[in-house]
Image (spheres, coloured by chain):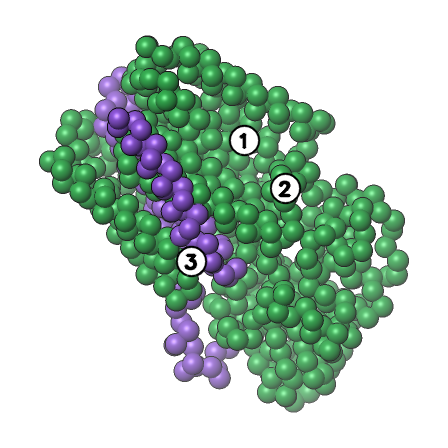
Amino acid sequence: MTDVLYLYIFMLAAFTGYEVISRVPVILHTPLMSGSNFIHGVVLVGAMYALGHATTPLQIALGFLAVLLGAANAAGGYVVTERMLAMFAPKTKKKLPAGEQGA
Amino acid sequence: MQWIVDGVYLAVAVLFIVGLKAMSSPAKARRGITWAGVGMVLATLVTFLVPDMQNMALIVVAIVLGGGVAWWAGRVVKMTDMPQMVAIYNGMGGGAAALIAAVEFARGEVHGPVVATLAVLGSLIGSVAFSGSVIAFLKLQGIMNKAFRLPAQNLVNIALGVAAIGLGAWIVTSSVGAGTANAWLLVLFFVLALVLGAVLTSPIGGADMPVVISLLNAFTGLAVGFEGYVLGNPTLIIAGIVVGASGTLLTQLMAKAMNRPILNVLFTPITGEAQAGGAIEGRMKEMSATDAAALMRYSEKVIVIPGYGMAVAGAQHKVWEMAKLLEDEGVEVKFAIHPVAGRMPGHMNVLLAEAGVPYEKIFDLDEINAEFPQTDVALVIGANDVVNPVARTDKSSPIYGMPILDADKARNCIVIKRGRGAGYSGIENALFYADNTSMLYGSAQQAVADVIAQLKELG
């Protein structure tokens, strides 16, 4: 029964993913790609499971590499997305120095 | 303990979905990444509470090491280099998903045909995403310059794909009951999958790159979802599959913006040699910064078309300074952005916003193309393929059918360009040879600075 339940989760998640971004302006395509890149960084949790249950040196080595890569995906994905989206912030601030924002 | 873990995982799934939703709207996008970030921290912390976890110290070391280096690299990298950073981080996620499957096979914990099938599929897709993303990174970073194309490329792709799937099916059947498979079989399978990803990606270049990265991003999502099933972890399933689905949709949207069906992107890549059509008529004319400044200064309307060359030169601030000088003289200045300008959709908007260009001066291709015939000067700065009229006229050209900005329809066209070479995709640009086009050679930064100096002199 649990196996079937998981398959239901698959199906519902697929519809959710499709619906959630159905109307997205072109200017957000890159940040959104970057943001979803960050979200699949949750693979880190799976990698922690794998390493956390590894026993032989081979398993530990593979698991260690998995955690390393997963953590890089999560941390790097966050920083990059955050920096891209920060560009959308100064919309209110920019009114002040409008005249002399050279260089 | 388990109920705390389960409860937090549920909250994390909600945070991810709400965060992703917010990220698809400009006003809420920043909140979105914060929510998703909170979700990620919670998910990581609570995983330490899972019963029977071993190797805690190693886990911490790996997180600090991998996360720390990636965080630092993401901080220091230039805005123009963001696309390849997305590619490489995505590849790491795919690699992690594949490694999870490897660990589970090594532990003999892959029980039942469904689990085995998803473990194999997840590692196949994850490995392809890993090696494909590494190639994409190397290309965008400029380390790997030439499109590398095998003879009978598509046949090789299909053969590799079939072999990998066949081997995967073998692994699935042999693992039933055993919970694992022959180690050499597994090694061969992973090697094959990695080679497939590299071979599939290496011939792809030019404006197709963002579509490929987006597709590989969706792949990693699916791989993560599948490995979530193998581990029985709903958060991984939900996050992975949501990204897989939304990533697929995003890939379609990007491909549509370029008028390039996804299958064409993968199987008939744009390459310079593919061009069969006749030689381009006319010759390139050079123009001085003085003439360019005068021409624009006494125009009524100028449309600036920024491209990757401007981004690389970091000239966006200078360009905005020039635009303000022109506006002070009563010239109407607009910015026209091609959907894939700057290698990735939206990338150029981000760079211009950083320089302080107001949103209301930035226009999409659909919004502005009709205005070119009434425009005095189209100023092309470091853009090439996206203004090549060949895309409209020459059926034999590899970029035929791609929507372009109609710079050639403006009364005058000034092109700022480093040298005389062909564009990123290696295709000659008919615009540069047109009668009403003049070339202003130099790096975007220097050329625009010269124009600014001349404008100030004109007063």
Where residue A49 sits, quadrant-wise, is top left
Residue type, mark 2 in image: Val
Helix, strand or loop under label 3: loop
Observer-side mark, 1 or 2, equals: 2
Which secondary structure lies at badge 1?
Answer: helix
Q: Residue furthest left?
A: B1
Q: Is residue B88 visible?
A: no
Quadrant of the frame with the C terminus of chain B: bottom right
Residue at the (52%, 17%) spot, across then down: B166
Please name the amino acid that badge 3 sits on: Ser
Q: Chain of mark 2?
A: B
Disc 1 residue type?
Gly
Residue B287 image-quadrant placement: bottom right
Q: In this view of the protein, which residue sits in the foreground, B260 or B182?
A: B260
Chain identifier of the residue bearing label 3 in the image? B
Q: Label 3: which residue? A: B24
> Spatial distance from mark 1 to mark 2, Cα to Cα?
14 Å
Q: Chain of mark 1?
A: B
Residue B143 in the image, given as x and y percentages of width and height: 58, 42
Q: Is residue B275 above or below residue B292?
A: above
Question: Which element carries disc 2, helix, strand or loop?
Answer: helix
Rendered location of residue B401, percent (x, y): 72, 52
Q: Nearer the viewer, residue B19 or B71?
A: B19
Work out whether residue B332 or residue B82 is closer to the camera in this orientation and state it. B332
- Mark 2 Cα within 10 Å, few/some/many (few <14, many 20+)? many
Sequence-wise first label, 3 or 1: 3
Q: Position of residue B353 (x, y in %)?
A: 49, 68
> Label 1: which residue?
B197
- Which residue has dot 2 on it? B265
Q: Which chain is green?
A: B
Q: Residue at x 77, y 41 (%)?
A: B273
Of the numbered discs 1 and 2, the one sitting upstream in the chain is 1
